[in-house]
Image (spheres, helix red, strand yellow):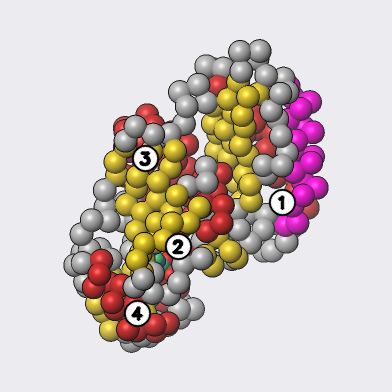
C-alpha cells in the first residue's frame, strides 16, 4: 500500500518546523519515528499534503537526569529509554514501560514525543506520563507551553496540542529509592498493543503502612485514567486491601467492548492487573524482587 502524494519538508531548526506548521495548518503532519503515522498514511487513513520531518531538527534528542527530574527530548527513541542506565537508576518505571512497546525494531524508531502526541488509549508511555503527572513541553508560534500528564490527553488520539505546536520534551520526577513501582499489561500477542495496562507506585512509612501510592490504568477508556481517589494511604498492605481497591476501581471505569475484548473482559483484566501492580509495587518497596 502506498500513501497519497505529499510534499516532504526536512527542517533543521525547531523554529522552521513551527513556521511550517503555522503556514500549512491542518494540511501538515509532523513525522518523528513514523511508526504510527506511516502505517496510517499507507492505509490512507491519514492523507497529509505535507509531512514535516523532525528527525534533522537539533536539540530534541537529549536525555538528561538532574537532581530531581529526568528530562527527555521528544525525539528520544523508546529503545534509548529502555537502555539508559541513568534513566533506569532515576526512574525505572519509565524504562520498564518503554521496554513493553511493540517489537525492538519499532522501539528503535518510535519516539516518546510521537507516542505522547499520538495518544493511543492503550499506549504505555501516556499511561506513565499520566500516573506520574509528567511535565510536557510544547512549543508553538506564541512560545512555550507546559502541560501536565494528567491534563494532556483529551480523547482517543487527541491531546491538548494545537496543530501548529511541536511537543518538544517531557520531564518525569525521580522515583524515591524506597518507592516501589510496577507496570503490568495484557496483550493478545507479544508486541501487540495492550488490551489493558496498569501502573502503580507505593511508598511506606516507618509504621509499615502506605505513606503514598499512585495507580493508573489504560485501555479502559478514551484516555489513561489516574485512580487517585482510591487511597491506600494509612493502610497496611494485604491481598484483601488490593482486592477491594481493584473492585472499587472496576466500579469507576466504563470500558467499551471491541474486536480485542468485551467490556466484561476489560473489567476482569483491570481487576487482575491492579492487584498484580499493587502487589509487585509493594514487594519492590519492601526490597523484594517481584519477578
Ligand atoms: C506493529 C506496531 C505495534 C506497536 N505497538 C505499540 C505498543 O504496544 N505500544 C505503544 O505505545 N505503541 C505501539 N506502537 C506505536 C509506536 O510506539 C510509535 O512509535 C508511537 O505510537 C508513535 O511514535 P512515533 O515517533 O513513531 O510517531 P509518528 O508515527 O512519527 O507520529 C505519530 C503522530 O504523532 C504526531 N507527532 C509525532 N511527533 C510529534 C511531536 N514531537 N509533536 C507533536 N506531534 C507529533 C505525528 O504528526 C503523528 O500524528 C506500535 C506500532 C506498530 C507499527
* CA distance separating discs 1 and 3: 32 Å
Q: What residue is rendered at 75% in x and 56% in y?
A: 254
Ligand 1 under 8 Å from disc 2 Cβ: yes
Sooner in the amino-acid sequence: mark 1 or mark 3: 3
Mark 4 or mark 1, whichever is nearer to me:
4
* CA distance separating discs 3 and 2: 19 Å
Q: Nearer the viewer, residue 127 or 135?
A: 135
Q: Nearer the viewer, residue 267 or 281?
A: 281
Residue at numbered disc 3: 70
Which disc is residue 266 wearing? 1
* CA distance separating discs 4 and 1: 40 Å
Ligand 1 under 8 Å from disc 4 Cβ: no
Q: Secondary structure at mark 3?
A: strand
**Do the residues bearing badges 2 and 1 touch, measured as CB atoms within 8 Å?**
no
Mark 4 or mark 2, whichever is nearer to me:
4
Residue at numbered disc 2: 117
Left or right, residue 189 beside residue 2: right
**Do the residues bearing badges 1 and 3 touch, measured as CB atoms within 8 Å?**
no
Mark 2 or mark 1, whichever is nearer to me:
2
Which disc is residue 246 wearing? none
Is 242 a magenta residue? yes
Q: Secondary structure at mark 1?
A: helix
* Furthest residue toward top: 207
Mark 1 or mark 3, whichever is nearer to me:
3
Q: Around disc 3, counting alpha carbons within 10 Å, would you say few (fewer than 14), some (14 to 19), or many (20 or more)? A: many
Please provide percent x and percent y for residue 126.
51, 52
Sooner in the amino-acid sequence: mark 4 or mark 1: 4
Q: Around disc 2, counting alpha carbons within 10 Å, would you say few (fewer than 14), some (14 to 19), or many (20 or more)? A: many
Residue at numbered disc 4: 22
Amino acid at each position: 500500500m502506498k500513501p497519497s502524494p505529499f510534499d516532504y519538508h526536512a527542517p533543521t531548526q525547531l523554529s522552521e518546523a513551527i513556521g511550517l506548521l503555522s503556514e500549512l495548518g491542518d494540511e501538515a503532519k509532523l513525522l518523528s519515528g513514523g511508526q504510527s503515522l506511516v502505517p496510517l498514511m499507507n492505509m490512507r487513513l491519514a492523507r497529509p499534503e505535507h509531512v514535516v520531518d523532525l528527525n534533522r531538527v537539533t536539540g530534541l534528542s537529549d536525555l538528561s537526569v538532574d537532581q530531581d527530574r529526568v528530562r527527555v527530548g521528544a525525539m528520544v527513541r523508546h529503545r534509548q529509554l529502555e537502555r539508559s542506565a541513568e534513566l533506569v537508576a532515576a526512574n525505572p518505571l519509565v524504562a520498564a514501560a518503554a521496554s513493553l512497546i511493540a517489537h525492538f525494531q519499532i522501539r528503535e524508531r518510535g519516539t516518546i514525543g510521537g507516542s505522547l502526541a499520538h495518544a493511543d488509549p492503550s499506549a504505555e508511555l501516556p499511561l506513565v506520563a499520566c500516573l506520574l503527572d509528567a511535565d510536557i513541553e510544547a512549543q508553538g508560534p506564541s512560545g512555550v507551553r507546559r502541560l501536565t500528564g494528567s491534563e494532556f490527553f483529551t480523547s482517543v488520539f487527541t491531546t491538548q496540542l494545537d496543530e501548529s505546536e511541536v511537543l518538544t520534551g517531557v520531564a518525569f520526577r525521580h522515583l524515591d529509592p524506597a518507592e516501589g513501582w510496577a507496570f503490568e499489561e495484557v496483550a493478545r500477542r507479544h508486541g501487540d498493543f495492550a488490551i489493558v495496562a496498569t501502573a502503580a507506585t507505593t511508598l511506606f512509612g516507618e509504621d509499615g503502612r502506605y505513606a503514598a501510592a499512585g495507580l493508573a490504568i489504560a485501555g479502559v477508556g478514551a484516555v489513561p485514567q489516574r485512580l487517585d481517589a482510591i487511597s491506600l494511604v494509612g493502610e497496611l498492605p494485604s491481598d484483601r486491601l488490593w482486592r477491594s481497591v481493584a473492585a472499587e476501581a472496576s466500579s469507576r471505569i466504563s470500558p467499551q467492548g471491541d474486536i480485542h475484548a468485551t467490556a466484561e473482559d476489560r473489567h476482569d483484566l483491570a481487576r487482575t492487573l491492579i492487584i498484580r501492580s499493587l502487589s509487585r509495587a509493594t514487594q519492590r518497596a519492601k526490597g523484594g524482587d517481584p519477578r
